[in-house]
Image (cartoon, rainbow, N blue to C red):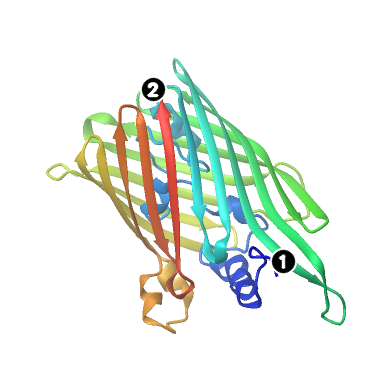
Amino acid sequence: MPRDMKSPLQILLMVFILSEVPLLHGETPAFQVLEYPFSPRAMAMGDTRAVNVTPSLEAAGNPAALTFTSDLQGKVGLVNHLVDIKGYSAIGVLPLENHRISGEMVYFDYGLFDRTDAFGNPTGSFGFHELSLQMAYAYSITDRWRLGTRAGWVQRVADNTTSGQGILNFGALYHLAEDSLTVGVLVSNLAVDEGSDELPTAIRVGTSKILTYLPLRLNLETDYRLADNWLLALGGEILLHPQFTLRLGINSNRFDLHTGVSASDFLAGVSGGFFVEWMGLQVEMAAQSFGAAGFISQAALAYHF
């Protein structure tokens, strides 16, 4: 069997990822690539995506947050998911006075799987992957009010079956620079047309605040999925230096697992990471726990000109 072929144990874990793990956030999505935060910042801060007031680019984040970028910037990322699933992302932004235009690509590769006949005999292998291509536009109405939208296409290829759908996202931010307070709303993964797959549509509302007497930014967010499930998330950035930040987060995944089969489940929803910048180069790392299922790690490299 090839080294990248999934074993029966890996396939069982794969089923867990595609069914149980998404349930932590609400409905089981047709496209996992839309469910996962391809951003070390969001991941390290408990999957808080509605509010980002830093120049750090976030794929699948609030498009209105692009208004906080001031330079031409590009970013690539790698996700090391469970059972050797790999994710790749690339995003770039072009600033034009009060306008921002960005493009992003996110790709999930689930690897190779055995194909068998009706009697369970191996007949070959097949691949499974998902791809999302999106463009975003953001506009600063005033220093306080910022709006953004993102549109694109998501596609899944499993064996010889291909399906795709158009998607829309909308975001808004209210920012009080003098109080270091920001409130954001993100409506994500709306279907453009009536496809055969149900998208993980969600409404996120969050707030961000730098504490007065501590070098700490706190993000608090609630995520409502249309399947009547909620996610609560709390994230923090310890601002040790303008070029070095520690990030910590926790969300309500622990309470949605409903297992308690091992002590490691207690860590589900806990995350952390860091951000380093040097001469225009930005390095970000993050890790998030899914309890007994294991840890997911993410790394990104960005450069602004």
Residue drawn at x 79%, y 52% is 162
Q: Check disc 2 and report the residue beneath it.
A: 70
Query: What amino acid is labelled 1 in the image?
Result: Phe
Query: What amino acid is labelled 2 in the image?
Result: Ser
Q: Nearer the viewer, residue 215 or 194?
A: 215
Label 1, label 2: how far apart the Cα atoms are = 44 Å
- Classify residue 184 as left or right of residue 38: left
**Residue 297 position within the rendered picture, expressed as x and y whole percent measured from the top left:** 44, 56
Residue drawn at x 61%, y 56% is 32
**Residue 43 position within the rendered picture, expressed as x and y whole percent measured from the top left:** 42, 52
In this rendering, the answer to whether 204 lies above or below 267 is above
Q: Check disc 1 and report the residue beneath it.
A: 113
- Classify residue 166 as left or right of residue 35: right
Badge count: 2
Residue drawn at x 46%, y 40% is 58
**Residue 178 position within the rendered picture, expressed as x and y whole percent measured from the top left:** 22, 30
Query: Of marks 1 and 2, which one's residue comes earlier in the chain?
Result: 2
In this rendering, the answer to whether 139 lies above or below 175 is above
**Residue 86 position within the rendered picture, expressed as x and y whole percent measured from the top left:** 57, 55
Q: Residue furthest right?
A: 118
Q: Nearer the viewer, residue 46 or 143?
A: 46
Badge 2 marks a residue whose secondary structure is loop
Residue 133 picture quarter: top right
Residue 260 picture quarter: bottom left
In this rendering, the answer to whether 42 lies above or below 252 is above
Residue 49 seen by the camera: no
Residue drawn at x 58%, y 67% is 17
